[in-house]
Image (spheres, rainbow, N blue to C red):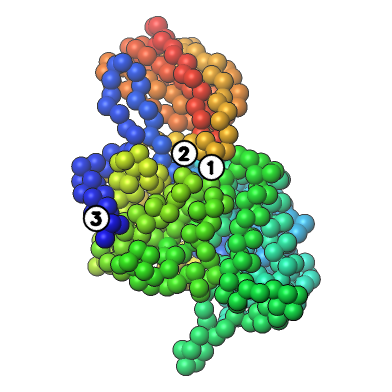
Amino acid sequence: MRHLLRSLTALAFIAAMGGVAPNAAAQSPDGPPPIPREFRGAWVASVANIDWPSKPGLSAWQQQAELVAILDRARDLRLNAILLQVRPAGDALYASTLEPWSAYLTGVEGRAPEPYYDPLAFAVQEAHARGLELHAWFNPYRARHPSATSPHARTHLSVTHPQWVRRYGKYEWMDPGEPGVLAHSVKVALDVVKRYDVDGIHVDDYFYPYPETDSTKAEVPFPDSVSYARYRAKGGTLGLSDWRRWNVDRYVQRVYVGTKRLKPWVKVGISPFGIWRPGYPASIQGFDSFEKLAGDSRKWLREGWVDYFTPQLYWPIARTAQSYPVLLDWWIGENVKGRHMWPGHNSSRAAAGSAEWGPDELNNQVRATRATTANGQGATGDIFFSMRSLMPVQGAARSPQSVGVATQPPPPAQAEALADKLVAELYGEPALVPASPWLGAQRPPRPAARVTRDVASGDEVVRVMSASGARWITVQVRRGNAWRSWVLPAAQRSLVIGGADSAPADDVVVRTVHRNGRESMPLPLRGAPR
């Protein structure tokens, strides 16, 4: 009841907010308002070519053009992060000596893009150039997806270590109980941390696989009896379910600790199934991910083995047994370490539309997220599955194989309308990624900047000469009583803030923002005289 009452209070607060971004302040000539802090992310799925690339076998130029279109769209929607799937099934959408090139890129597992390039390095560079964070998204244990048509490469784990891989339904699965699987999967994630300038490492909800059933609808046990028997023979005392959760716990902990050892500023996030266990809180019913997936997601959050936590809350607000705000409120209550809470949304279902998923449902869920911060604590952002549901018509008219409820291709016109509504009502202003003070208290130095008139055009321009330690640059300009704010990528060193005929800005404030989210002290400037 406590969770229900708090959630109803949050819903009531939505109306009062009217869609205003969190931390927004009234415009005042006394100083610039704080720029909103809100994580706005979207998953870009490569498995089954859901989001990118649109199909296997495209040339490198076509792949790059599609990815640039996705990143441009994310920037235009005022998102600030992309979670790119780089390891869908023991393969790699990047140059790796540990796993083969993904067939979702070239149509043949083990074959590199042609002409050659490194998609992850390209994605990081292009995302950062647009002011977007780039998080590398991993599936930790899947070895083959039903959509795969290419035979395994000689370097795939199922070929090099077949004793570690189990056939389960239409899938192949790395057995999490095999010590070699644990070591390999952790090594793969940390290899990316070490070699790429990613902003985050992201793990999805597939730990032990979702249960398969036989022709009588009876659940088929996952075939890990050999690895479990070996564990018991060596003196292990845990029961089967506890042993499976222990295996997954070690993966989560080692990825987190290893990432912090290599690059403390790289965020680690997990997007588990949205329900920990039925009955938590009391009104919640549904799938038991604690038992069925061996995912003790509440433990990972409470232990602080994540920097951000993204429960997949893929249900509408009004569905009592899995209500979005009720579940979100419960997860916030479990966040004892104060990590970022950025829930996941089923924007694909919202874009497809139904009686439950009306045109306002997605925006109302974002409003519910924002409402949790009314007391200074709560969720500070949202992540959408998937980017396909937010693309314009010309970028959405393709038909990947459907692989589940959340990935049904939405009607393109509805998808575009969904994104337009999101921007019009909620994402009208830019937002900075929330700061992560536990990842470092370092504040970047103030930038060197000045306001000038462009010699050729006469435009009023802010020029940044140096921005040491910056991932972003913020510029805020006052004319009269009104402030306007920009969030720029660190590589951008000039910004037009007024036309040739405009009066000089009354005040200009420039800051640098570190990759841990900390802002520099402000650099106050005056407008450029005509």
Q: Is residue 287 left or right of residue 90?
A: left
Residue bearing the label numbered 3? 5
Q: Are marks 1 and 2 in contact (CB under 8 Å)?
A: yes
SS at mark 1 in the image: strand
Q: Are marks 3 and 2 in contact (CB under 8 Å)?
A: no
Q: CA distance from mark 1 to mark 2?
A: 9 Å
Residue 18 in which image quadrant: top left
Mark 1 neighbour class, 10 Å CA radius: few under 14, some 14 to 19, many 20 or more: many
Identify which residue, 126 or 161, lies in the foreground: 161
Place of residue 513 in the rendered image (x, y in percent of width and height, measured from the top left): 52, 29
Residue at 31% x, 40% y is 375
Q: Of callouts 1 and 2, which one flags the residue occurring earlier in the amino acid sequence?
A: 1
Residue at 32% x, 23% y is 483
Q: CA distance from mark 3 to mark 1?
A: 35 Å
Residue bearing the label numbered 2? 433
Q: What's the mark number on residue 133?
A: 1
